[in-house]
Amino acid sequence: MIQYFHNARLIDPEAGAERLGSLTVEGGQITALDAECPAGAEAIDCAGKCLAPGIVDMGVQVGEPGAQHKESLRSAGLAAAKGGVTTLVLRPDTDPAIDTPEVLEYVTRRAAARTPVNIRAMAALTRGRAGREMAEIGFLLDAGAVAFTDGARVVRDTKVLGRCMSYAKGLGALIIGHPQDPGLSEGACATSGKFASLRGLPAVSPMAERMGLDRDMGLVEMTGVRYHADQITSARSLPALERAKRNGLQVSAGISIHHLTLNEFDVGDYRTFFKFTPPLRSEDDRRAMVQAVADGLIDVICSMHSPQDEESKRLPFEEAAAGAVGLETLLPAAMRLYHSEGLSLPQIWRALALNPARLLGLPCGRLAVGAPADLVLFDPDAPFVLDRFALMSKSKNTPFDGARMQGRVLATYVAGACVHTQEKANA
């Protein structure tokens, strides 16, 4: 079947431009741009709405195996399709951790059978994510792991981390780090400052992130490994990141949509849906991060989707679990950056789709002939009030509950197959 998308506002992150045009899809691939409608094609009128590459969400936590009550592969896949996410990149912080080829094969096989979107998985850097012994990086790479990380569990032993990086360098593998000094960060749930002091919350200085990044950059320089910092959230970390890139190190960085659109004051009166790791930063830091994305210093925006059940969140702020669901709120939250004129749509999609696909060696994330027809059709201006109980995710822990938002996904396509439409969702 041939599909012809016309009257579309094409968002092209590779060219850094947007324009009115058309797109032809055949056999699950983009076969032409701005061509005439082929005979017998299914014509899809986009009505002037935005057509962009599907989002590649780098760093999604799913509770399967071990915590399916929080999020299953099926519910995560449905949430992703509804949110315009066509490729989920799973974190290895499951129970058991994805630290052997057998667990990786189990997750990818179940995902392929239960989800309508593409699934790729990261693997643990160390066994059990315990930071003591290197995981089977070579075997995991052969089994399909796209990157290696222990997630928010920082490898404390510098010698162990250095050995992992040296081994990964020899295999061309990507290491994803969580830049935090573990000693300073332990037990903290807020960013140090007047607000945290007035609330009586255990806090950590943003320098903990800078110190963790400095250590990792030193090891990257020593080993030459490809390295991605999962979250850079503080302005104090930017000079070290910029210096590493300028010196030719294979370094990239990401940030969650929550750290780009929220600040420390959103915690308010101990609202646990706003508890994250690292904690929310100052408004000055948030603005600096938006500018860093615009400048290309920060490469990736992701949801850092972390489902937590009610029992984990309805606790005192210090004891509550950190994280929020984000698959369905990633796009409308990103539209806040567009409507505030902080970022253009091509800049947003460069960070949401093109850059993560390139980092992981995936062919998607582009509007180009030969690229997979993983697409999202959306209206960046459509207003709505978010109801967390309408989310497809099993867990409903979103900081945007009740918020007025703009930006609705109208349809999501994976390899040309429609996996979500707003009309079906509302039926």
Image (cartoon, grey):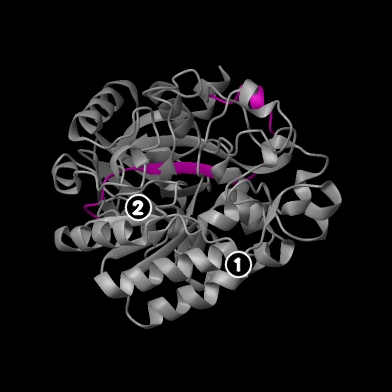
**Magenta segment boundaries in residue numbering:** 367-392
Crowding at dot 2, Cα within 10 Å, few <14 / some 14-19 / many 20+, comes out as many
* Residue 367 makes an appearance in the image: no
Q: Which residue is mark 2?
A: 365
Residue at (47, 77) in percent of width and height: 242
The front one of 388 and 149 is 149
Image quadrant holding the N terminus, namely: top left
Q: Which quadrant of the view contains residue 324? A: top right
The amino acid sitting under disc 1 is Met
For label 1, the residue is 207
What element does badge 1 sit on?
A: helix
Q: Nearer the viewer, mark 2 or mark 1?
A: 1
Residue at screen point 15% across, 58% down: 171
Residue at the image point whose x is 31% and y is 43% from the top: 124
Q: Confirm whether the magenta stretch covers residue 230.
A: no
Figure check: 342 above or below 77: below
Marks 2 & 1, CB-CB < 8 Å contact: no
Across and down, in percent, residue 257 comes to 57, 50
Residue found farthest to the right = 198
Q: Please say if 291 is above or below 330.
A: below
Q: Between marks 2 and 1, how big is the CA–CA gap?
A: 34 Å
* Disc on res. 323: none
Query: Residue 13's x, y, as percent?
Result: 42, 61
